[in-house]
Image (cartoon, rainbow, N blue to C red):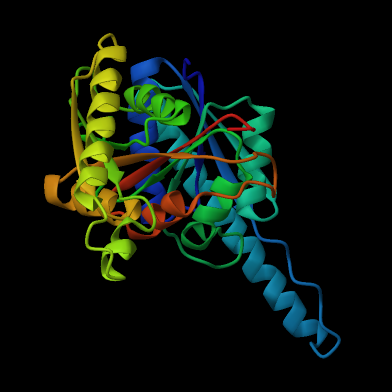
Amino acid sequence: MALTTILVGCDLSPASDVALDRAVAIAAQHGAGIVLVHAQAEEDAPHAAIDPATLQQLGEVSAAVRAADAVALADRMAQVEARGVAVELISRIGPPDEVLAHASVERAAGMIVIGSHGHTGIARMLLGSVASSTIRHATCDVLVCRGPATRTPFQRPLVATDFSAVAAKVLEHTALVSVPGAPFDVVHAWQLPTGSWGATLMGQARFPWSTVRDAVLASARSLADRLVADHQDLGHPLHVELVQGPPSSVITHAAERAGNDLIAVGAHGRRGVRRLLLGSVAESTIRHSPCSVLVVHGDPQS
């Protein structure tokens, strides 16, 4: 996969500026272009109880805000161009998640980049409340940025893996947003099969849960070794850690402990506008991650 077009949700908040800085750094690394996407809220329909004078005042305020937004958007476009990256603007009326998803299809974008939260107001988009919704609507990768503004690709990613085909795709796509040669921390959360602990608690003392545990770990280690061997040409050294526990907790705690600046996860399931049902692991990671999150979609039937 080659990144040629990156969409950036821009609500003119500090969080969206963080997303723009990161997106421009990634675009510069790949020679890609940036498309700024600004979603404008639909004007509320006039209410019969509001007098004409008040309606006129509201209209004047709305026009002033739109004019201020236009100036701010032009300023951000100039900043992107000054960094040697081509940029264009899409400004449309509608829900931000839908505007972003539709624009990404029109521009055949490889990635949507958004901030983790924003602010509301006339012609503003609330990124915080629509981050998960954007990922549900999108058919391409979505990068949700958190943390301080940084003008470099990611330097210490954590990649969550379940050793599936989607997880292998996550590794490859993480390389696209990382500095060349950056080491990848890879974490696999393993758990005992349902019932193995329960059998012991129910008095079946001879239940060989330790044997089951050893077998699960041995299988995971074998898959981890194969993962490393299969990605020797990735250009990023892999350090795989096997941790027992619920995946979402294992992933976020590992990132907090190691100080990773990115968590990359896969989303399984059917894709399509309004149809994507993210796995609980991806949903929880987005909510609780201490850093930016890259969500990579699997194939529609994966």
Task: Tell me the residue at 46%/19% (across/down).
Answer: 32
Relative to 259, residue 203 above or below: below
Residue 41 point in image, percent of width and height = 66, 60
Residue 216, picture quadrant: top left
Residue 158 point in image, percent of width and height = 25, 38
Total numbered labels placed on residues in the image: 0
Task: Tell me the residue at 54%/46% (across/down).
Answer: 135
Residue 298 point in image, percent of width and height = 53, 32
Task: Tell me the residue at 31%/70% (across/down).
Answer: 202
Q: Horizontally, is 54 left or right of 116 in the view?
A: right
Given the current orientation, which residue lies at the most extreme top position?
Answer: 233
Is residue 266 visible to the viewer in this orientation of the structure? Answer: yes
Residue 222 point in image, percent of width and height = 25, 25
The C terminus, quarter of image = top right
Residue closest to the eye, 17 or 158: 158
Relative to 199, residue 230 above or below: above
Residue closest to the eye, 117 or 151: 117
Given the current orientation, which residue lies at the most extreme bottom position?
Answer: 49
Given the current orientation, which residue lies at the most extreme right position?
Answer: 48
Is residue 150 visible to the viewer in this orientation of the structure? Answer: no
Residue 238, picture quadrant: top left
Relative to 235, residue 107 above or below: below
Task: Tell me the residue at 66%/46% (across/down).
Answer: 99
Residue 125, picture quadrant: bottom right
